[in-house]
Amino acid sequence: MKYAGLLVMPAGFLLSIAAILLFPAPAPRTAFALCGLAVEAMGLVVAVRGHMQSRGDTYQ
Amino acid sequence: MTQPAPSPMIETTFALTLLLLLVAPLAIAGVALINTGLGRSRSAAQSLLGCLAILSTSVLAFALVGAAFAASTGADHVFHLFGKPWNWAGAGPLFLGGFAAAPARTQLAMLFELLAVALVAIIPWGSGADRFRIPAGTASAVLLAILVFPLLAHWTWGGGWLAQLGVNFSLGAGFLDGGGAGTVHVLGGLSALAVVWIAGPRKGKFPREGLSTAMPAHNAIYVLFGCLLALVGWLAWNMAGSILWLNAAPTALPLTAINTLLCAAAALVATFTVTRVRFGKPDASLCANGWLAGLVTSSACAGLVPPLAALFAGLVAGVITPLLVELFELALSIDDPSGAISVHAAAGLWGLAAAGLFSPQQGQFLAQLIGITTLLGFFLPLIYLIFKILNRVLPLRVDPDGERLGMDLHELGGGAYPEFVVHRDESYR
């Protein structure tokens, strides 16, 4: 699950790059870039949840 | 025909920048002292020696290899996409080729980047305290110095695609990061997150039942003195960064210094208040974290925003830092003894956003936002992948016996405080 989250994060980065390439107007650019940031945040949440699940008993 | 005399103003600027860069290492000393104080007494000598070893290896690796990719030359690696140039890596000479004859400004930029790469590599060392081995720490520093930091340094400071967002996409003045909030602190903080994810928590930190075990800082004096030392270094660091990367005139430097101080002071007051309200008494470790978070925030915005905005940015950093430290430890099971993820990564990201929010320049917020998404979406997965591969070759974590003994005895053969009576560790239940 941690890897799934970390794989989602570059998608958010590419989304923000797409924002500046595809939209010349500032408002849709910002909205699209914020969506990219939101995707990264979701990826991070998934990765953190994966860490909490795998924290397990290894080092207790 | 005689050559025209160099402009005295320019010479003064060079001399001032050099002087500031000679004081800037105090920021590294402060962070090293804070990391050591926040760890346990049985790992104190290993922590400080590790800092020196990591500083040395990262500086050597960057000078010999990494600087070639960070450098800004006329022949950088560029590809074209949608009709726009994307400058993604420098193409300077390896092994410091021709560096002795480089212009003074290039040499000053190199000195700044050498200090920056050392600080980037030291930040995750504090998060891995009490379990991160020196050989693995130095290896991670080398990888950061040749694979990761040069890319971001080039993109931000070396005329790379982030710096050119203003020219190519009309986004303000491009991604701005004078004091290295993103290039140094967020990168270091994200490396710290990767290290604690891979190395795991300290033994006994998260028992099967009940709350996590408190493992308090072993020396609050180191921690708080480190904060004062860091302030001196940070003032010099931010001013030198403003001259080198924001092309600030010397007359603009007092405002940069004032903003740095306001940011740190507001952050400390906020953290002091938050911990006083939450725990009934102010918490020294968390206050130190808040102070440092204010300084990290100032790295992004000290040279760009008005004083009141800097004060507000510091205030927000001071409020969120203790809450994040608590959230990471109690709710997310992340064992980060130095609080680097909250202090360097989170506060750095906030600082970058604040610099865009309060900058008078049109489009600057979006430029800063693109920088933030690059740090999170490109560099965090990259660093995690690199450290994960490193962990296969050279385990980051010490073996259980070494952790039980303490890193000083295990790795150095002697403790930092040989005359102290050592008590049984209650965390091993």
Image: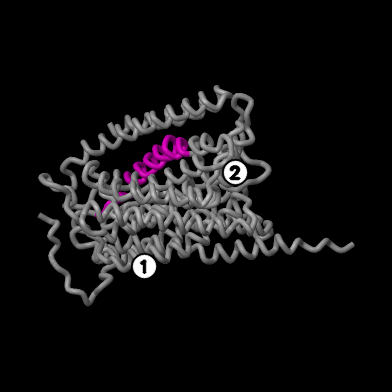
Q: Residue at x 55, y 27 (%)?
A: A26
Say which residue label 1 marks.
Answer: B225
Q: Is residue B427 left or right of residue B110?
A: left
Q: Quadrant of the C terminus of chain B?
A: bottom left
**Residue B327, which numbered label?**
none
The magenta region covers B372-398
Helix, strand or loop under label 1: helix
Q: Amino acid at mark 2?
A: Gly
Examine the rendered structure and indicate whether residue B136 appears above or below residue B84: below
Chain assignment, label 1:
B
In this view, B69 is above or below B404: above
Badge 2 and badge 1 both on one subunit: yes
The quadrant the N terminus of chain B occupies is bottom right
Q: Is residue B394 magenta?
A: yes
* For the residues bearing labels 2 and 1, Cβ distance under 8 angstroms: no
Point 32% across, 44% down: residue: B392
Residue B60 seen: no
Instruction: Kindly identify which numbered label has been placed on residue B90.
Output: 2
Which chain is mark 2 on?
A: B
In the figure, is residue B429 to the left or right of B169?
Answer: left
Q: Is residue B176 magenta?
A: no
Foreground of the two, B406 or B218:
B218
Look at the image and tell me whether residue B328 can be seen.
yes
